[in-house]
Amino acid sequence: MLERSILEKLNAPTREERLHNLEAVLKHTVFPPAVPQYINNHIHTTYSFSPYSPTAAVYAARTEGLCTAGIIDHDSISGAREFLEAARLVDMPVTVGMECRVSMAGTRLAGLRTNNPDQAGVSYMTIQSVPHHKIDELNAFFHPYRQARHARNRIMVSRINALLPEMQMDYDLDVLPLSNTAEGGGVTERHLMYALARKLTGQIGKGAAVIEKLETLGIQLSPGQQSQMLDVDYPFYEYDLLGILKSAFIPKIFVDATDECPALFDIVALCREIDAFLCYAYLGDVENSVTGDKKAQKFEDDYLEDVFECLKEEGVGAVTYMPTRNTPRQLNRLRNLCDQYGMLQISGEDINSPRQSFVIRAMEDPKFKNLIDATWKLIQHETKQKENFI
């Protein structure tokens, strides 16, 4: 995690301030050598949910020795130009893209649960390697879908208020300021839980009072979670609390996404038009969670061949996955299917918490060299465009 004083400078209120502060910080920064194996193409920023602005994300990634990085925000690519400019200042090649959800209606996967823990029939996809002169076009396409998500978020906030009348959150005052919404940022369920965490600590404080409150809500904490809640000096206390609240409350307040999820057919056509890579995000069944932070749940493994048939039929040409999130058996099967169906393999592990490292240690394994090579292919694809405006 970045030194707090540096993070505050790089998370200043405006893009101009953040980039100006980066220039000042760089005068006193000596980066470690960049490690060729360290790549991460899935870094969230404050244009969705993250402790890092695009500027801070670039600086943090380079500080940890990454040789390249990629911005991925939910329903938004509004942070891409700042990310690119920060990368230029840091002298690190990067790639830009975004994450979205698509409706699988009309495909062979209609109504099935694929990679979405909250809703069947809706799949997560990433749009990778967006040509820089197409950033605004892509962001404009998703504007109405972001607006539809705001409407659903308001319903979920009302459900939170019904469950916890003593909290009484206001979507406009408590939630929207947590994302760069005014500049086209996306708002996710994590924002709702973070707002709830801030509301809770604002009312009752931190430490034992929070543990007691959670217990009255029927939330039993593990020893590790209790230790986190007692660490009142941790500067990102509410990030730990939101993780606890998310597992407890999202199932109770969740509303199915409908109007905010474009059809797969339309997203395939969009990516062809803007010359970007559309990727299915493989999740895989969770049994004994590899990372220790996910409950057992079934996803797409029982019909993974059908997933690939669907991707082939619908014109999706790439798959993205997170090597440290899956078992060797899952990875071997997935990679074999990618080869069989001629799918480009792309990797990156989502960064949205201050406790996470930007480094993907799995990339040190030579068998994942294809994922490193794919990253440079994405960068080359972006930078070959003649109209490269920042």
Image: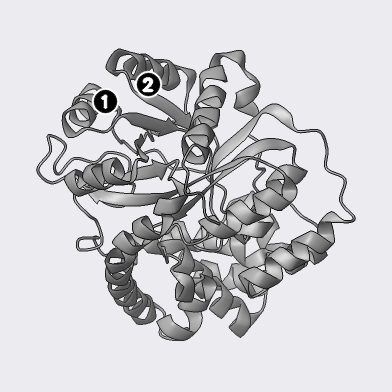
Q: Does residue 242 appear to the left or right of 330 in the view shown?
A: right
Q: Does residue 189 appear to the left or right of 20 in the view shown?
A: left
Q: Can residue 26 be seen?
A: yes
Q: Which percent across, then down, holds residue 102?
A: 25, 49
Quadrant housing residue 153: bottom left
Q: Are marks 1 and 2 in contact (CB under 8 Å)?
A: yes
Q: Secondary structure at mark 1?
A: helix
Q: Does residue 143 appear to the left or right of 306 in the view shown?
A: right
Q: Which of 320 and 206 lies nearest the eye of the viewer?
A: 320
Say whether disc 1 or disc 2 marks the residue closer to the N-terminus.
1
Question: Which quadrant would the C terminus be assigned to in this image?
Answer: bottom right
Q: Which of 209 and 288 lies nearest the eye of the viewer?
A: 288
Quadrant housing residue 301: top left
Which residue is labeled 1 in the image?
A: 304
Q: Secondary structure at mark 2?
A: helix
Kindly identify which numbered label has been placed on residue 346: none
Q: Can residue 220 be seen?
A: no
* Residue type marked 2: Leu
CA distance for labels 1 and 2: 8 Å
Question: Residue pushed farthest right?
Answer: 28
- Residue appearing at x 33%, y 73% in the figure: 150
Which residue is labeled 2 in the image?
A: 334
* Residue type marked 1: Leu
Q: Which of 293 and 315 lies nearest the eye of the viewer?
A: 315
The relative height of residue 164 versus residue 29 in the rendered view (above or below) is: below
The relative height of residue 367 versus residue 71 in the rendered view (above or below) is: above
Quadrant housing residue 277: top left
Q: Which percent across, then down, holds residue 91?
A: 72, 44
